[in-house]
Image (tube, helix red, strand yellow):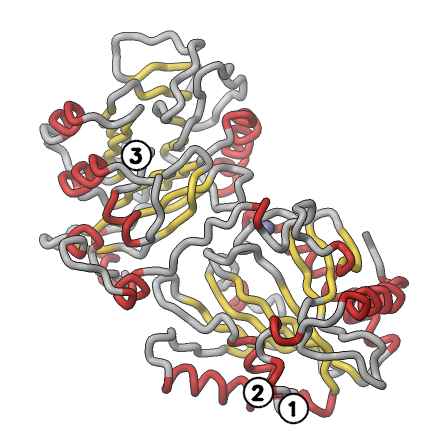
Amino acid sequence: MTTKILVLNPNPNELDKVLEKANVQNSKNGPFEATILVGDVIPKDKDLPTTQLKQSTYFGQGYNGISDKIVESEFGLVDIQNELIYVKPPFSVIKLISGTTMLILSGPLTRESINEISKIKVNIDLLFTYKWPKAIAELETISQVSDELVDLVVQQIKPKYHFAVGTENGVFLELEPFKWSNNEFTRFISLGQEGSGGKWFYAFNLIKDEDIEELKFIENPFTMKKRKLTDDSKQAITKKPKVVSPSECFFCVGNPKTETHLIVSVGKHSYLTVAKGPLTRSNQDLSFSGHGIIIPIQHISNITEEHEDIRQEINKFQSTIYQSFVKQKPFLSLIFFEINRFNNIHHNIQFLPIHESQLKKFQNSLNLKAKINNEKFKRNQSLEFKEFDNEDDPELLKFKNLDYIKFTIYSKNGVKIYITKLFKDKSFDLQFPRRVLCHLLNLPDRLKWENCQQPKYKEMSDCEEFKKFYKDYEFT
Ligand SMILES: [Zn+2]
């Protein structure tokens, strides 16, 4: 029997909203055998939710106390209302109908609880803690997320999945699984809080033992801890998660660093700007640089199924921008390029115009740069591009929830898409898309945007010209 589980890190100020979403998920992608809420779910001074749940939902105490509206019973599990179950500190072991077992820790971990946990006799499939183990926090070089006692719990019970949040706002991180000496394996997932920008929900089928062979394992951070971590070994595990907050983010509208004089158009979920340090410049064919960026308004690292409305609006920007080129500059095609990656700081899609005549060289530039990447830079992950000429190709739709690099070309000949999967635990060249386009346009000096910055008056005129150019297609 397959067990489907949903894990959420709600914002305690919007708990009902999250529970309603959980109900929707349950009807759409479920049924889930259990939903587990992680983090500070109903901290001190908060009211109980009123949403009627359609599935068994469990939560424990976080690090900010527990609402005094919860009347504690002497049992480890407290029914708050239909299907909403509170796990009293320090922990409970819960066995689901499918046989799946969960250990949910509640409140700050103590030495005494470790002692009690060591007496648990059943194998635990799913472990839920607040803090990260220190071994993983050190690997990721982030502080304030870990508690050494969590290391002891993980090493004792070796769960198949370990969920945590790290801090009050949560930090998103997903590690590939790692093995223990007896061939058991653990997969670590930390969720951001809803609204924090990091991924805050995780729906999954429990991996069956017979599927283990298909997994890709990383080195075990707990056994690795005993020797000094070199930069190389850190990089081999995973890239450091970006914990840039919206107030420090270049692409978050409303933060003082946002350069509003670059903004061309603002939609409901995304906005359009001219690029700072553009690769292409204004010339006799076009009165502005033409290098632009479409950016989700929400501080999100990547676009997945969860962000269908954002993706749709971005597609609308893409097609209307292209229509404005078809009408006014029919000899120019458009190349959109995007790195969709779980640890981006803030997702974005860039584009620039290119002469029809240069387009036939695109595949050559792409192949050449991919070959150099794959053969000369062994530490980078190998890039194997697949080509599609239909945006609704079922093979292409399979990339929806993966990390990838994608080029989408709109031209007289229709659409062409080149896409390659990215693996989470391998490093890669962030400059790759711009590198390909620099080669294609024969502009080797314009690889780094920092070296292509224009004076502010030029940025403003690029933006104004783009606005005029796009005016008739503006849909926002
Ligand atoms: Zn941002």
Mark 1 lies within 8 Å of ligand 1 (Cβ measured): no
User: Looking at the image, which is closer to me, 448 or 177?
Assistant: 448
Q: Could you give the CA–CA distance between mark 1 and mark 2, rounded to whole angstroms?
A: 7 Å
**Contact (Cβ within 8 Å) of mark 1 with mark 2:** yes
- Vertical placement of 392 versus 73: above or below? below
Quadrant in which residue 473 is drawn: bottom right
Observer-nearest residue: 263 or 94?
263
User: Type of residue at label 3?
Assistant: Thr
Does residue 293 appear in the picture of this structure?
yes
* Residue pointed to by mark 3: 129
Query: Which residue carries the number 2 mark?
Result: 363
For residue 101, what is the image quadrant? top left
The residue tagged with tag 1: helix, strand or loop?
loop
| Residue 25 place in picture, x, y as percent | 51, 38
Residue at 73% across, 47% down:
268
- At 55% from the left and 39% from the top, the residue drawn is 195
Q: Is residue 465 above or below residue 374?
A: above
Query: What amino acid does circle 1 point to?
Result: Lys
